[in-house]
Amino acid sequence: LSLAERLANYVVEGTKEGLLDDLKQALAEYPSPLAIINGPLMDGMSEVGRLFNDNQLIVAEVLQSAEVMKTSVSFLEPFMEKSVESSSKGKVLLATVKGDVHDIGKNLVDIILSNNGFKVVDLGIKVAPADLIAAVRREKPDVVGLSGLLVKSAQQMVLTAQDLREAGIDLPILVGGAALSRKFTINKIVPEYNGLVVYAKDAMDGLSLANRVLD
Ligand code: B1M
């Protein structure tokens, strides 16, 4: 198997045997650590999603795939480019919405923003609107970032935006995650909120939008 196929396979099989050696080799061959994540590792995750959808994998197996992804991201993180400016660009409050446990994408957004001059406060997963509102008041962020992968999470983002509006909050919101689209964001979330709402398709897009929003 090629290096790319082996890397995707670790994720699909949920096994870590040989993973770190292949990641080291990939660091030498790929243009950046993020290219390893967005390329072969994400290919593996897409295949996991497909097999799971097809009932060929059970949740316990998908959890092992998630573990491989998390281990890989932790291993690659120290090799990612970091900007010199120290947490001066602004503060981002990050959360996976209520009812949703998926956090690999959110954690990637955290890493990318933190490495590029943002101070990130991560509230974790299954964050209810009331907890988000309390955190906005406590942390006084410049941007709120919401992640969600389930179809019902897209609807939860609409409810969260409504609750934020009712609480008098109009900070820019950055939304992302597999269940969302730019169209859904514009048609469903934007009308329910008084502030700016922007959709990011991936973590790098999230970074450039966060930069633009705070410029
Ligand atoms: Co779940 N799951 N899962 N799962 N899971 C999906 C999302 C699913 C599409 C799989 C499938 O059926 N094909 C499906 C959703 C279907 C739907 O809603 N229509 C699904 C399901 C059904 C479920 C359960 C309901 C299964 C069950 O229990 N029967 C359950 C839900 C639990 C819950 O949330 N209440 C469940 C559970 C799990 C695990 C716990 C086993 C595990 C998650 C572990 C974890 O995260 N700690 C898991 C996984 C791993 C997946 C898949 C296979 C992979 C997700 C992932 O990590 N991708 C997923 C299928 C798939 O996506 N192909 C699936 C890698 C990650 C880097 O990508 O998060 O998309 P992603 O992030 C991207 C972008 O979206 C974006 O940037 C990242 C890339 O740079 N992004 C943002 C994300 N958030 C952002 C925020 C931003 C900006 C960009 O700004 C704030």
Image (cartoon, grey):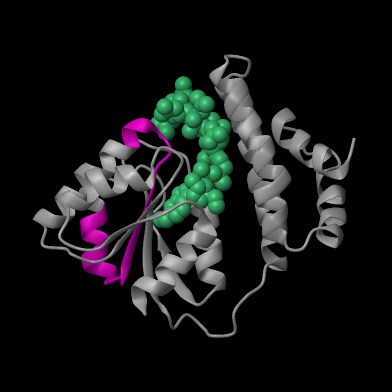
Residue 149 in view (yes/no): yes
Residue 97 visible in image: no
Residue 186: x percent and y percent? 27, 49
Question: In this image, 96 relative to 69: left or right?
Answer: left
Residue pictured at 58% horizontal, 28% vertical: 49
Quarter residue 51 falls in? top right
Q: Does the magenta stretch include residue 75?
A: no
Position in image of residue 173 (x %, y %): 30, 60
Q: Which of 134 and 115 is in front in this view?
A: 115
Q: Quadrant of the N terminus?
A: top right
- Image quarter of residue 89: bottom left
**Number of disc labels:** 0
Tell me what residue is drawn at x 50 percent, y 67 percent: 113
Point out residue 77 in the picture as x, y percentages from the top left corner.
66, 62
| Residue at screen point 44% across, 45% down | 177
**Compared to 81, does 3 lie above or below?**
above
Q: In which quarter of the image is residue 84?
A: bottom right
- Magenta residues, as a range? 132-153
Horizontal and vertical percent for residue 138? 25, 68
- Report the residue that reaches farthest toward the top: 55
